[in-house]
């Protein structure tokens, strides 16, 4: 019995120690504190149906749950990348969103009917200066990605050869 108690204590300590490294942005929890507001998931299926910022509902998904994917800083804004997850295999692609939080303004959800992953995967993406780039897979033979600068969402498509050349020119 004593060994079991020691193992349980050790497991708890390891879990607590691993948390921040495994989830540096805190997006895998139901609460995310940012400089521009405290975001909380609550209600509905799995208690993750609605998004609240500082106690006020700012988003309610018609899907089964909300999944926080990544937190970014763009200028003075906090931008949270999230999806409306269906939770089943008979659903279409999960819609993707950005939630923009900026001190002194109302939280803003940015959506587009074309903002979804063509291959079903949702990766956190990368940030290049003040632009968030989210890879959205391939659709109709073209590479698909989203660019968001904190104000405007652009969904782009190009052949891999054209996009690769543009990336090399921009970087070089």
Image: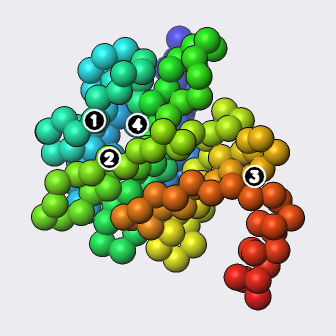
- For the residue labelled by badge 1, is the local secondary structure a helix, a strand or a loop? strand
Q: Which mark is residue 29?
A: 4
N-terminal label among 4 and 3: 4
User: CB under 8 Å between callouts 1 and 3?
Assistant: no
The quadrant in which residue 127 appears is bottom right
Identify which residue is drawn at 40% across, 69% down.
Answer: 74
| Residue that label 2 marks | 109
User: CB under 8 Å between callouts 4 and 3?
Assistant: no
Disc 4 versus disc 3: nearer the observer: 3
User: CB under 8 Å between callouts 1 and 2?
Assistant: yes
Q: Whole-Å distance between the Cαs marked 4 and 3? A: 31 Å
Q: Is residue 80 above or below residue 129?
A: above
- Horizontally, residue 117 falls left or right of residue 110, namely right
Residue found at the far right of this picture: 161
User: Where residue 133 sits in the image (x, y, percent)?
Assistant: 58, 61
| Residue that label 1 marks | 59
Q: Whole-Å distance between the Cαs marked 4 and 2? A: 20 Å
Identify which residue is drawn at 53% across, 17% down.
Answer: 87
- For the residue labelled by badge 3, is the local secondary structure a helix, a strand or a loop? strand
Identify which residue is drawn at 35% across, 34% down.
Answer: 30
Q: Whole-Å distance between the Cαs marked 1 and 3? A: 29 Å
């Amino acid at each position: 019995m004593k060994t079991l108690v020691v193992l349980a204590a050790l497991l708890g300590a390891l879990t607590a120690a691993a948390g921040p490294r495994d989830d540096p942005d805190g997006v895998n929890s139901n609460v995310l504190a940012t400089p521009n507001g405290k975001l909380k998931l609550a209600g509905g299926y799995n208690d993750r149906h609605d998004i609240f910022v500082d106690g006020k509902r700012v988003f309610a998904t018609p899907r089964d749950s909300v999944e926080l994917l990544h937190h970014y800083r763009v200028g003075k804004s906090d931008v949270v990348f999230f999806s409306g997850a269906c939770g089943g295999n008979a659903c279409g692609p999960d819609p993707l969103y950005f939630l923009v939080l900026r001190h002194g303004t109302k939280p803003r959800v940015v959506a587009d009917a074309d903002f979804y992953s063509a291959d079903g995967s949702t990766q956190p993406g990368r940030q290049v200066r003040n632009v968030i780039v989210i890879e959205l897979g391939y659709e109709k033979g073209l590479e698909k990605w989203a660019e968001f600068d904190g104000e405007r969402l652009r969904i782009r498509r190009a052949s891999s050869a054209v996009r690769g050349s543009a990336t090399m020119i921009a970087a070089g």
